[in-house]
Image (cartoon, rainbow, N blue to C red):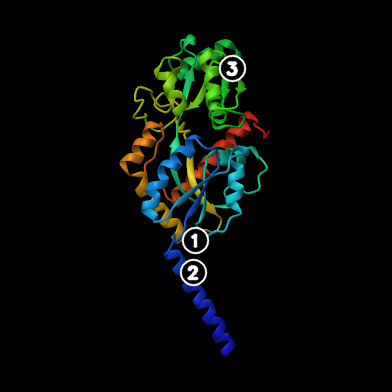
């Protein structure tokens, strides 16, 4: 009996210590793994969030860039980290796109992670070569029909978000066009400006500067609502393409099994920070969108719906991992 009571006492003590550790979270620096290179869009946002998060959480946010394999390298690192809230992942919808293609990775999406919240969404802009004199997506569709498929479109890489969104457009409209994959978003935009491709879906932060200069024609944006910094560009949905909210998410994950109190603490901290005027200004100026109300259940639903969308696109376009 003494042995049983002793064992129960240890279990009880362990529960107490675990509860204390979670309620005391965080009590040391948090390592935030950004799965993309320094100066990438997602990295710039995280560095803007780091200082106000430090003030909110009372601990330093140590940013570690682990780029490679379209974000899979950093994702795998966090999937294998201890589920204690001190190693987190900041990654994008590329995670779902890799999964939809059936790309072999050292983790499963989303089973290897604890989704925490979506920080912001990055809308895409449908841009066209000005020399084509098209003003709407419908004009572009009519042009593609008249060209009988002899039309080219760019992407920032094979299997990149710009590739997936363009294939979604082709699936919804039935047009034929040939992909010209580039190595980055700026390279794809240069192809667009030169007129070597007819159109492409560019991330808004890349599309808006040349669009405002008249070097490309912005036909529509994939966000639910018009962008405050470019209110003149209509949305795909208001132009007659329902359920075309194809902005890609950028969210925070922990390893599988992250304790709920830790998740809740991070959700509250991030959403408070996202409401700060200086943070809102940065996100808006880089053409990103956030409502500062995401949480784990909402993010889980977003991930599920998003994966289904891109799985359907993969099936339509027969996109295979390289």
Of residues 292 and 310, the one drawn nearer to the viewer in this rendering = 292
Going from N to C along the chain, the mark reached first, 3 or 2, is 2
User: Percent position (x, y) of residue 74?
Assistant: 58, 45
Of residues 262 and 112, the one drawn nearer to the viewer in this rendering = 262
| Residue at mark 1 to residue at mark 2: CA–CA distance | 10 Å
State the image quarter where residue 100 is shown: top right
Most extreme residue toward the left, as rendered? 277
Task: Report crowding for label 2: few under 14, some 14 to 19, many 20 or more residues within 10 A (C-alpha).
Answer: few
Say if mark 1 contacts mark 2, CB within 8 Å. yes
**One can see residue 72 in this view:** yes
Front tag of 3 and 2: 2
Say if mark 3 contacts mark 1, CB within 8 Å. no
User: Mark 3 — residue?
Assistant: 152
What residue is rendered at 49% in x and 17% in y?
Answer: 128
What residue is rendered at 46% in x and 31% in y?
Answer: 244
Front tag of 1 and 2: 2
What residue is rendered at 55% in x and 39% in y?
Answer: 36
The image's mark for residue 259 is 1
User: Mark 2 — residue?
Assistant: 18
Going from N to C along the chain, the mark reached first, 3 or 1, is 3
User: Percent position (x, y) of residue 253?
Assistant: 51, 50
């Amino acid at each position: 009996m003494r042995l049983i009571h002793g064992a129960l006492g240890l279990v009880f003590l362990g529960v107490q210590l675990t509860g204390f550790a979670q309620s005391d979270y965080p009590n040391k620096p948090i390592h935030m793994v950004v799965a993309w290179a320094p100066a990438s869009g997602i990295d710039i946002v995280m560095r803007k969030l780091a200082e106000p998060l430090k003030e909110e959480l009372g601990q330093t946010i140590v940013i570690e860039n682990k780029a490679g394999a379209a974000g899979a390298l950093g994702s795998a690192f966090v999937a294998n980290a201890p589920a204690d809230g001190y190693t987190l992942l900041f990654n994008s919808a590329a995670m779902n796109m890799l999964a939809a293609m059936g790309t072999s990775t050292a983790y499963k999406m989303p089973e290897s992670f604890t989704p925490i919240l979506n920080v912001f969404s990055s809308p895409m802009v449908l841009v066209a070569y000005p020399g084509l004199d098209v003003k709407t997506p419908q004009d572009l569709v009519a042009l593609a029909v008249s060209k009988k498929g002899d039309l080219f479109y760019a992407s920032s890489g094979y299997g990149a978000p710009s590739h997936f969104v363009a294939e979604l457009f082709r699936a919804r409209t039935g047009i034929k066009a040939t992909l010209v994959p580039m190595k980055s978003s700026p390279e794809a935009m240069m192809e667009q400006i030169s007129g070597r491709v007819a159109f492409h879906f560019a991330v808004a932060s890349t599309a808006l500067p040349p669009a405002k200069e008249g070097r490309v024609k912005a036909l529509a944006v994939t966000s639910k609502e018009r962008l405050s910094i470019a209110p003149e560009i209509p949305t795909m949905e208001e132009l007659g393409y329902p359920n075309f909210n194809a902005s890609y998410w950028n969210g925070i994950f922990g390893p599988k099994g992250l304790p709920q109190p830790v998740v809740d603490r991070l959700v509250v901290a991030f959403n408070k920070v996202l409401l700060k005027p200086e943070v809102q200004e940065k996100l808006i100026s880089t053409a990103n969108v956030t409502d500062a109300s995401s949480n784990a259940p909402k993010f889980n639903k977003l991930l599920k719906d998003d994966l289904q969308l891109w799985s359907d696109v993969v099936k339509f376009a027969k996109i295979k991992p390289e």
